[in-house]
Image (cartoon, rainbow, N blue to C red):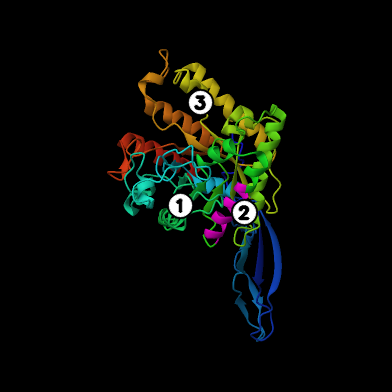
Amino acid sequence: MNCMKRFKIKIRGILAVALVAVSLCGCNKANPQKAVSSIYNSETNNAAGTKSQYGETNKPTESKTQCDGTNKPTEPETIYIEEIRKSAYDYAYECGMGINLGNTFESFWEDKNNKTTGAQIIGSNTPSDYETCWGASVVTKEMISGIKESGFNTLRIPVYWGNMMADDKTFAINEEYMERVEEVADWALSLDMYVVINIHHYDEFVIKNHTKEETLLIMQKLWRQISEHFADKSDHLMFEGYNENVGATYYGEHLNEYEIYEYANRLNQVFVDTVRSVPGNENRMLIVSGYYTNIDKTVDYRFVIPKDTADDRLMVSVHYIDNDKYWSRRIGSAEWVSYVDSQIAALCDRFDKEGIPVFVGECFSVYDNQYMAEDSLYEDSKTCLKLLLTKANDAGLVTCLWDTTDNFYLRSKCTVRSDEEKKIIQGIERKRNCT
């Protein structure tokens, strides 16, 4: 199965405008002529020459009569690529394997009396006070470099934007906190990685403590500030609207399921519209959040991909392909394998038709023995991890491991916890690049 339809050529569905310089008989004068080509076929040869990866024929050198009457070889055609536009599937392909910087910038201490932020003021109220309040160490450039060297090409940075925010109901994000998130994002971007920034946990606080209309207005304020601050970043920075609470509602507000789906769709539409309205983000890749990021609820016909002024610039986010079998302690069983296959198929069947790549923002990175089935077909966590990631990546899904300090990736040592698990990640990356 390959719902993403893109491995023979990494850049697909692309149009390029080529300027062809052709040497003509004109006493040392050239007359450039424009040619427009559709780019698809890449691997065919013929008697007249070979096809390049852009579909242009590389013809053998020919002789042409020159102005002095002699026959001299003419120079081959020179192709100048003026523009190459990546598709959403190209972005998904280039994301490769991803990992979360978990329990770090989304960490907070709850304060139910704070109606703006839902969070306490911690310590000296500096970014590091919040960054470390769930046990993480302060993130360093070396940690990010180690993530890249371990085989990951995407870093998801969950963020609780209520941290350090004033309780004045303006929902103004603290500039110092924003700059610290930016610093870490820049480290990853400098390594040519993809970076995903979202609203994490704070989405739950806002949604559950405000009416629908209030929430939509607050999310608009938040995303305007985020997209303005990061507007000058490269296209390797992607925004993900929310975390797992698109589908939640205000405490005491009773909506039926159809109304909740409508509300979820409005939340995603506000996210897309707000980001697109900010200069510098007109064509940025955006990830819309699934209904509770639950696969079964997200593939439901009532979940609607938002309208977008940009062409081919959306993905959809879900979490934990094998979530049900994890909590029922059936990991590794034949039942688990069948369930994984069915969940991947459901995603492909729904979103491939709409041309929307799937971003699995969180996957289990470690399967503790207590979650393994007694009749497991596989001996350990590593084997199950490799099987799930292989299936998902073969289908074209982008997978991001959920990880916290010294869980799968050891931040204290800047490497994956075992050579075997590191080889799993690097092996999947090699397989993607060779497919």
Q: Amino acid at mark 2?
A: Val
Nearer the observer, 305 or 224? 224
Callout 1: few (<14), some (14-19), or many (20+) C-alpha neighbours within 10 Å? many
Helix, strand or loop for disc 3:
helix
Closer to the chain start, of discs 1 and 3, is 1
Q: In the rendered view of the protein, which quadrant contains the N terminus?
A: top right
The percent position of residue 229, horizontal first and vertical second, equals 52, 59
Vertical placement of residue 248 versus 217, above or below: above
Please identify, in this view, whether the residue under mark 3 or under mark 2 is nearer the observer. Answer: 2
Q: Residue at x 42, y 16 (%)?
A: 373
Q: Which mark is residue 275?
A: 2
Q: Which mark is residue 323?
A: 3
Q: Nearer the viewer, residue 231 or 166?
A: 166
Residue 305 seen in the figure: no
Contact check, label 2 and label 1, Cβ < 8 Å: no
Q: Is residue 109 magenta?
A: no
